[in-house]
Image: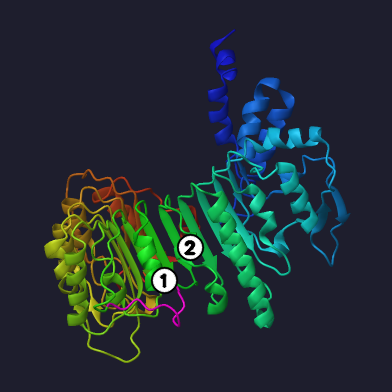
Amino acid sequence: MTSTDRALTCVDILEEVFEWLILIPGRKHNKHNQKKDEHHVGRRALAHCARVCKVFFQPAVRVLWARLDSVFPILNTLPSLIMVSERSAYDRQAIYRLPEDVPSQEWDLLCAYAVHVKAIYIEKPPYTRKEGFTQDTWKSLRRLARNRPVCPNLRRFSWRMDELPGTPDDLIPFLGPSVTAMCIYCFPTDLCRFDSAQEHIWGTRLETLFSAVYERAVRLQQLWIYLDERMTPLVATKIPLSQYLLPTLRSYLLRCGTITFTDLVTLSGVATLELLELKKLDSGILQLEESPSRGPLKFKRLRTLCIRDLPISTSASIGLFKFSPLRSLRVDGIEYRDPDTLKRMFETWSHDFPSLEALSCGFCMPKVPLQRAGSLSTLLSPLRNTLPHLRTINLYLGGIPGVTIDDNDIIVLSEAWPLLKQLHLWAAKDKISGHTYGLLSLMALAKNCPHLEDLLLQRIVVRPEDLARLPADRPIHGLRLLKVKSPEKLSLGWLHDYRMITERIFPQLPSPPGEDMEELYRSVHASELPMNGD
């Protein structure tokens, strides 16, 4: 037996090979159809491997069944599953039903495959699914499972609840102590006629759902809840955090629900919580403003905080977490008022979170024209003086009128944060007149930030007088990702500038910058687009 033959009989090696094989996409796809046929050819090839060779069968089955986008393959292992309604031009789903009497041999066959399932992602809307099941099917499945999870090794579970009538019975049979990560999507398709009766039904469903999660997924570490923003607060109040939070929770995300100060107190009592993300919460119930009776809370292990589009004062909401050992802070939807207010906010954050390593901020346009902001380095001066260990800076500056960024600003930032790994500075296309930095900024980042890996800028202005200052020797820098969002980047002049940057400043950047851009360069003439910086 040759070494190759011996390698092909090793289960660990075969699983490693098959894990790469399943990633083969169905066809060359672009950003518009990237998910359409993803991994189609790889899964089919892996299924062929399981059929043609006994040695390949077990490792191939383990990889094939590890991740599913539907529960139909699991139920389809039961020969007793019957189709009661076929797909048609009027009904896109084929409806299946599982009878009450299922032989034990069939259930053993299902268990033999279900034991390999580690992740189930049911995230598609109902109108895109090819299979549906009657409510009797879930009752029969729960009776066969005898209150045990159908997939005993399931780790991650994403589930989408869309339509009425119905109950979460299709979710409950798969919940068990092995589930550590769960995403729940609740986007009703009939909100156009959402009345009080449906509010009551949806509220009951949510109560049943989260009660089941709390009782069965006792080791849950990640819980992400996405609710349709059109759902009324009455329905959202059916998720009382104080009642359904597990002591093992590490990551919690809530989109378009409701949260009160009492809920935050409960969250602060979860000793294992490390990530908290709140998005678009209800303005009628959310009241987090600081007061003498509602002081800051202490989250013992909270490392990442993300607050996006909350209808409350940003300073008040962030101030509630001032005693938390944050490493990463993201705040979107900040309304700019004036430079002094913005600098005071940054000064407060630097004082409250001295261990901060990542900062992301998004600013929205003020309702009325206010004082112009001035230079970026001046606005960030409170952070430069107190947070020298920042490694990630992501700023959307489209909502700050009159902000200017030149080479001196980038040089100051590069000297203040030498440990930077990611730097994103961008704005809308019609608000880039104040972005005048160029090659000098890139040279300063290459010199002062040796760990920089990801750089996104709004534009790069290439001036003739800066070309003579480029380093003569080929530098050593590990930057591998450079994105420029300005319209000038699509010109043939930018292609020349990009190649010059890769040769003289960041030699590790890929060249050419990408197939899509290269095709565009071939399709235009040099005289049709302005040169960069004109």
The crowding category of the residue bearing disc 1, from other C-alpha atoms within 10 Å (few below 14, some 14 to 19, many at least 20), is: some
Residue 497 located within the stretch drawn in magenta: no
The quarter holding residue 304 reads bottom left
Residue 25 image offset from top left, x and y in percent: 61, 45
The disc placed on residue 243 is 2
Q: Which residues are magenta?
A: 280-290
Looking at the picture, which amino acid does disc 1 mark?
Leu
Please tell me which residue is depicted at 15% across the width and 64% down the height of the picture.
Answer: 384
Q: CA distance from mark 1 to mark 2?
A: 61 Å
Residue 282 located within the stretch drawn in magenta: yes
In the picture, measured across the screen, residue 508 lies left or right of residue 51, that is: left
Q: Nearer the viewer, mark 1 or mark 2?
A: 2
Please tell me which residue is depicted at 59% across the width and 14% down the height of the picture.
Answer: 5
In the picture, measured across the screen, residue 305 lies left or right of residue 91, that is: left
Name which of mark 1 and mark 2 comes first in the sequence: 2
Q: Which residue is mark 1?
A: 529
- In this picture the colour scheme is rainbow
Residue 15 image offset from top left, x and y in percent: 56, 29
Task: Kindly tell me whether residue 485 is visible in this rendering.
Answer: no
Residue 43 image offset from top left, x and y in percent: 66, 39
